[in-house]
Image: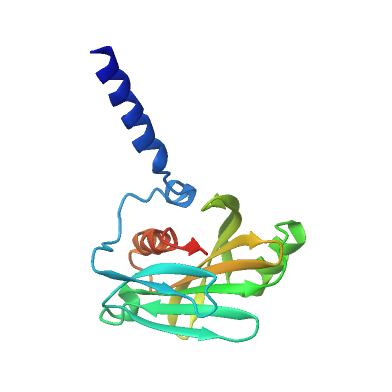
Amino acid sequence: MKLKLVILLFILVAATSCYKESSLKKEFNCSNSLDLSNSKEYRDIKKNYKITIPLKWKTKLYFDEYQSDILTADTIKQLSESYIINASWKMGELDFNEEFISKINSQTGYEIINSKHVTFLEYPAFWNLSKGIKGEMEQHVFNLYIKTTVDSYILATSKIYGGQNIEQRICESINLFNTIEVL
């Protein structure tokens, strides 16, 4: 009986320690999840990372000498109900210091709502959320900088249009970002 109890306890500890909830999901109190049962795994052209995207979404790949992008969106929904995701591997050094934060926050041209240093996928990361107007539509931009090596990083961006269900769409974006795997 003791052996069964020890084995059961070991299995429970192993199972719960394998799943780590993203600090971003906690930060934004995300309880919803995006259904990824009917999805496809995309690798960037330079084979630096992969991400899982729902099959019904329109997805395009782009690359040049210094970056490799995966751009995707649910084009079935109205723009004011959806969001556009861009996951991009980039060459360049990142230091998450005050100069970097000031530069990033001033480049958006939008009002910075919040920003924070985090660990994401076991890498040092920094995110910011900004809000502004594009055309005549309200837009929120969620940027997540993930430092993967000394001289490369992933920038995962979600552009959320309109003023409805912002938190839900940020959480869905985070769910997609959680599928990123650095290769």
* Residue 183 pos. (x, y %): 52, 64
Q: Is residue 118 above or below residue 2?
A: below
- The residue positioned 57% from the left and 61% from the top of the image is 128
* Residue 92 pos. (x, y %): 70, 71
* Left/right of residue 1 with respect to residue 14 in the rendered view: left
Q: Is residue 62 above or below residue 43?
A: below
How many numbered markers are drawn? 0
Q: Given the current orientation, which residue lies at the most extreme right position?
A: 99
Q: Quadrant of residue 76?
A: bottom left
Q: Quadrant of residue 4?
A: top left
**Nearest to the observer: residue 31 or residue 41:** 41
Q: Given the current orientation, which residue lies at the most extreme top position?
A: 2
**Nearest to the observer: residue 26 or residue 37:** 37
- Quadrant of image for the N terminus: top left
* Residue 104 pos. (x, y %): 66, 68
- The residue positioned 47% from the left and 52% from the top of the image is 24
* Residue 109 pos. (x, y %): 62, 75
Colour mapping: rainbow
**Nearest to the observer: residue 150 or residue 77:** 150
- The residue positioned 66% from the left and 61% from the top of the image is 149
* Left/right of residue 128 with respect to residue 26 in the rendered view: right
